[in-house]
């Protein structure tokens, strides 16, 4: 078999066989990025430069803050991918609503919300928490976002400066 210079998705290297590019194969293209070289020709590994994009800060309530929040495992009788949210509001919020979650205020004043169904990879895991003065208010007076963790109860402090 003839040695071949391969360029697979921006990376060029020397190989004794021809391989298909997995990225191109998944898009339906049957392209093999290969060009045969003469025997005895050395081809060093070369990295093709790509434009450098500026870093983008994650939106609030995402991975940057998620795992620094206090949390603990969900009860054993719950599905292992169920997510729960415990909101401490120091009895300052009359009505609290969390997107795609059902919940209630416990006697100790903490709101406890549970995901409607287990969270699986690829599903939206960031929820919107809204504080309202009346249950039928059109606009909430305070909003926070938090990322849920499957199998964990995440705590959120929701104090209002109202």
Image (cartoon, rainbow, N blue to C red):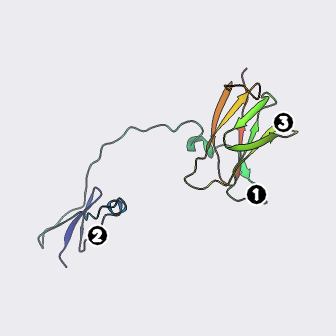
At x 64%, y 33%, the residue is 144
At x 75%, y 54%, the residue is 74
In this rendering, would 1 be left or right of 30?
A: left
* Quarter of image, res 12: bottom left
Q: Earlier in the sequence, mark 2 or mark 1?
A: 2
Secondary structure of residue under mark 1: loop
- The answer to whether marks 3 and 1 mark residues whose Cβ atoms lie closer than 8 Å is no
Q: Dot 3: few (<14), some (14–19), or many (≥20) neighbours within 10 Å? A: some
Q: Position of residue 107 (x, y in %)?
A: 88, 39
Q: Which of marks 3 and 2 is nearer the N terminus?
A: 2
In this rendering, would 161 be left or right of 39?
A: right
Where residue 19 is drawn, which disc sits there? 2
Q: Dot 2: few (<14), some (14–19), or many (≥20) neighbours within 10 Å? A: some
- Whole-Å distance between the Cαs marked 3 and 1? 22 Å
In this rendering, would 19 be left or right of 129?
A: left
In the rendered view, would you say 95 is above or below 149?
above
Q: Dot 1: few (<14), some (14–19), or many (≥20) neighbours within 10 Å? A: few
Q: Where is residue 100 in the image (x, y as percent from the top left)?
A: 67, 43
Secondary structure of residue under mark 2: loop
At x 60%, y 41%, the residue is 65
Give the position of the N terminus as an image quadrant.
Answer: bottom left
Q: Earlier in the sequence, mark 3 or mark 1?
A: 1
Residue, disc 1: 78
Q: Which of 57 and 95 is in front in this view?
A: 95
Give the position of the C terminus as an image quadrant.
Answer: top right
Query: What is the residue that sits farthest to the top in this orientation?
Result: 162
Secondary structure of residue under mark 3: loop
Residue, disc 3: 109
- Whole-Å distance between the Cαs marked 2 and 1? 46 Å
Q: Where is residue 102 in the image (x, y as percent from the top left)?
A: 74, 44
């Amino acid at each position: 078999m003839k040695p071949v210079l391969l360029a697979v998705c921006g990376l060029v290297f020397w190989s004794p066989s021809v391989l298909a590019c997995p990225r191109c194969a998944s898009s339906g293209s049957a392209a093999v990025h290969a060009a045969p070289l003469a025997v005895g020709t050395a081809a060093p590994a070369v990295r093709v430069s790509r434009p450098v994009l500026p870093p983008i800060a994650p939106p609030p309530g995402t991975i940057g803050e998620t795992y620094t929040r206090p949390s603990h495992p969900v009860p054993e009788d719950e599905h292992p991918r169920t997510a729960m949210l415990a909101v401490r509001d120091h009895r300052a919020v009359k009505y609290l609503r969390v997107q795609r979650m059902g919940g209630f205020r416990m006697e100790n004043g903490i709101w406890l919300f549970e995901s409607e169904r287990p969270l699986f990879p690829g599903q939206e895991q960031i929820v919107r928490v809204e504080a309202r003065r009346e249950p039928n208010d059109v606009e909430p007076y305070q909003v926070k976002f938090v990322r849920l963790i499957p199998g964990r109860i995440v705590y959120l402090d929701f104090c209002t400066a109202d």
